[in-house]
Image (cartoon, grey):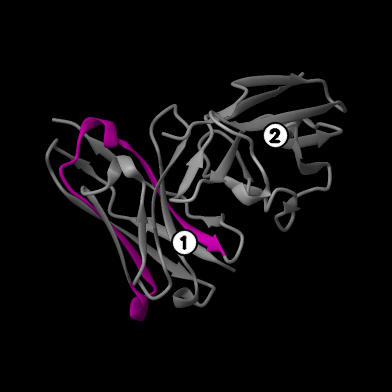
Amino acid sequence: QTVVTQEPSFSVSPGGTVTLTCGLSSGSVSTTSHPSWYQQTPGQAPRTLMHSTNIRSSGVPDRFSGSILGGKAALTITGAQADDECDYYCVLFVGSGWVFGGGTKLTVL
Amino acid sequence: EVQLVESGGALVQPGGSLRLSCSASGFTFNNYFMHWVRQAPGKGPEYISTISGNGDTTLYADSLKGRFTVFRDNSKNTLFLQLNSLRAEDTAIYYCVKDRSGTWSFDVWGQGTLVTVSP
């Protein structure tokens, strides 16, 4: 069974930079895993942030960027703002379907 | 504007069945794969199923095969998910999600419908 790993929590200061990662329990993440990222605030449906590793969805600020770092997918927020505080989920396509990571709760303080 | 509106969520007893619907508008429905994703209370989202634009191809999460069935009615721009043999652990918000063509990713999400499985 494929497990997608994310940091359970992360903290960043306002204006700071943070990189969230998304890995595989066995093996490395590459662009062929088609990494995508989703943002969710409490009580709301997820919102698509990024697809195809590093392509921002319409309306997503350019302080969000995606990449592959050290065998993991990465979401970097540059110049974090208070309203970036929420849950972030990555998704990988693993051949027979999609698998969500467990999510990272980002705190901005 | 793309809109997805789920309905059909309810309180159901263990072992029961339920059919969820998702009404789509704002795009050419039969041109897109569609997905179902669920989220249990306090947990992260979980992939359930995918169906191709013409309905000929379906995918399911391995853990859910056999109990859930996805289908669509393109004449009514509606996606469905049939839930059978429901268990307490199926309690979740069920989201309908439009595919982002060619990217193996999810695009627009509905607001979800709540399914509660309890005696």
Q: Is residue A72 above or below residue B65?
A: above
Magenta stretch holds residue B91: yes
Quadrant assignment for the C terminus of chain B: top left
Q: Is residue A11 above or below residue B21?
A: above
Range of magenta residues: B73-100
Query: Which residue in the rendered view is the most extreme toward the front?
Result: A27
- Relative placement, left or right, of B93 versus B101 is left
What chain letter is assigned to the residue under label 2? A
At horizontal 67% and vertical 44% (from top left) the residue drawn is A30
Observer-nearest residue: A52 or A83?
A52
| Amino acid type of the residue that numbered disc 2 sits on in the rendered structure | Gly
Magenta stretch holds residue B81: yes
Are discs 2 and 1 both within one chain?
Answer: no
What chain letter is assigned to the residue under label 1? B
| Amino acid type of the residue that numbered disc 1 sits on in the rendered structure | Leu
At horizontal 44% and vertical 76% (from top left) the residue drawn is B30
How many residues crowd around disc 1 within 10 Å: few (fewer than 14), some, or many (20 or more)? many
Q: Position of residue A1 (x, y in %)?
A: 41, 34
- Relative placement, left or right, of B10 versus A55 is left
| Residue carrying label 1 | B4
Q: CA distance from mark 2 to mark 1?
A: 35 Å
**For numbered disc 2, what is the local secondary structure?**
loop
Observer-nearest residue: B17 or A83?
B17
Q: Position of residue B81 (x, y in %)?
A: 29, 56
- Image mark for residue A71: 2
At horizontal 59% and vertical 69% (from top left) the residue drawn is B1
State if disc 1 and disc 2 touch (CB < 8 Å): no
- Among the 4 quarters of the image, the one containing residue B58: bottom left
Q: Position of residue B109 (x, y in %)?
A: 51, 54
- Relative placement, left or right, of A92 versus B52 is right
Q: Position of residue A56 (x, y in %)?
A: 74, 52
